Image (cartoon, grey):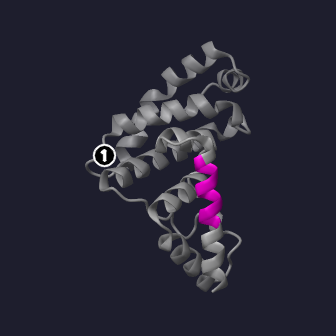
């Protein structure tokens, strides 16, 4: 993906015109990526739209201009997977090489953590996965799940407590 570093930097700094130009410029590349990353049955255009919205919301959090292509690729890939899971009516754990597992260097602990999360009731599992794996903000989770911010925080807290209890047993 080609990008103008000055345009990305201006967008990162909050220049709304730059953000609009950047989104328009990267849309064809996002669509190309979505066509390769989305599973059968998932509309690539939906993944692109959701990705553009996330880029718009989070461009200010981009750490370095040089990481923009990788950052957008990961957003599109994550949206394709999220839409696929939603289509199937389920939430799945990320792969074992996901950064969240970086601190668990023992395979047994990784498996236990995965089993602990899978054992959670759906409402807690979904909140935990969106927050800790998908890295959504509390507000984004609240919007997606049609809950208040307080309800989301409560579900995350309770879900984490249940995971701890599971791992202690």
Q: Is 30 placed above or below 5 here?
A: below
Q: Is 57 placed above or below 38 here?
A: above
Query: Quarter-wise, where is residue 168 in the image?
Result: bottom right
Q: Nearer the viewer, residue 74 or 108?
A: 108
The residue at the far left in this view is 41
The residue at the far top in this view is 17
* Magenta portion: prevailing SS class: helix
Name the residue located 30 percent from the left edge and 46 percent from the top edge: 42
Kind of element beneath mark 1: loop
Image coords of residue 20 (percent x, y): 55, 18
Q: Nearer the viewer, residue 77 or 50?
A: 50
- Residue 137 in sight here: no
Query: Quarter-wise, where is residue 5 in the image?
Result: top right
Label 1 crowd bin: few (<14), some (14–19), many (20+), radius 10 Å: many
Instruction: Name the residue tied to disc 1.
Output: 42
Image coords of residue 139 (percent x, y): 60, 39
- Using residue 33 as the reference point, say whether residue 9 is left or right of it: right
Specify the segment rendered in magenta. 151-160
On whether residue 152 falls in the magenta region, the answer is yes
Q: Is 58 placed above or below 23 here?
A: below
- Residue 74 in sight here: yes
Number of numbered labels in the structure image: 1
Query: Quarter-wise, where is residue 44 in the image?
Result: top left
Q: Quadrant of the C terminus?
A: bottom right
Name the residue located 43 percent from the left edge and 50 percent from the top edge: 82
Q: Is 164 placed above or below 108 here?
A: above
Image coords of residue 91 (percent x, y): 43, 59
On whether residue 158 falls in the magenta region, the answer is yes
Image coords of residue 102 (percent x, y): 68, 69
Q: Nearer the viewer, residue 144 or 61?
A: 144
Name the residue located 74 percent from the left edge and 23 percent from the top edge: 13
């Amino acid at each position: 993906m080609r990008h103008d570093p000055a345009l990305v930097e201006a967008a990162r700094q909050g220049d709304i015109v730059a953000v609009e130009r950047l989104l328009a410029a990267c849309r064809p590349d996002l669509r190309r990526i979505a066509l390769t990353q989305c599973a059968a049955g998932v509309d690539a255009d939906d993944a692109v739209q959701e990705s553009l919205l996330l880029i718009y919301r989070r461009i200010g959090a981009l750490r370095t201009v040089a990481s923009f292509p990788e950052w957008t690729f990961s957003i599109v890939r994550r949206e394709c997977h999220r839409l696929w899971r939603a289509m199937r009516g389920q939430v799945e754990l990320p792969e074992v090489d996901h950064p969240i597992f970086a601190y668990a260097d023992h395979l047994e602990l990784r498996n236990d953590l995965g089993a602990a999360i899978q054992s959670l009731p759906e409402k807690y599992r979904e909140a935990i996965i969106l927050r800790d794996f998908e890295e959504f903000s509390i507000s984004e989770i609240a919007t997606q799940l049609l809950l208040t911010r307080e309800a989301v925080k409560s579900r995350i807290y309770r879900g984490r407590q249940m995971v701890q209890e599971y791992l202690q047993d």
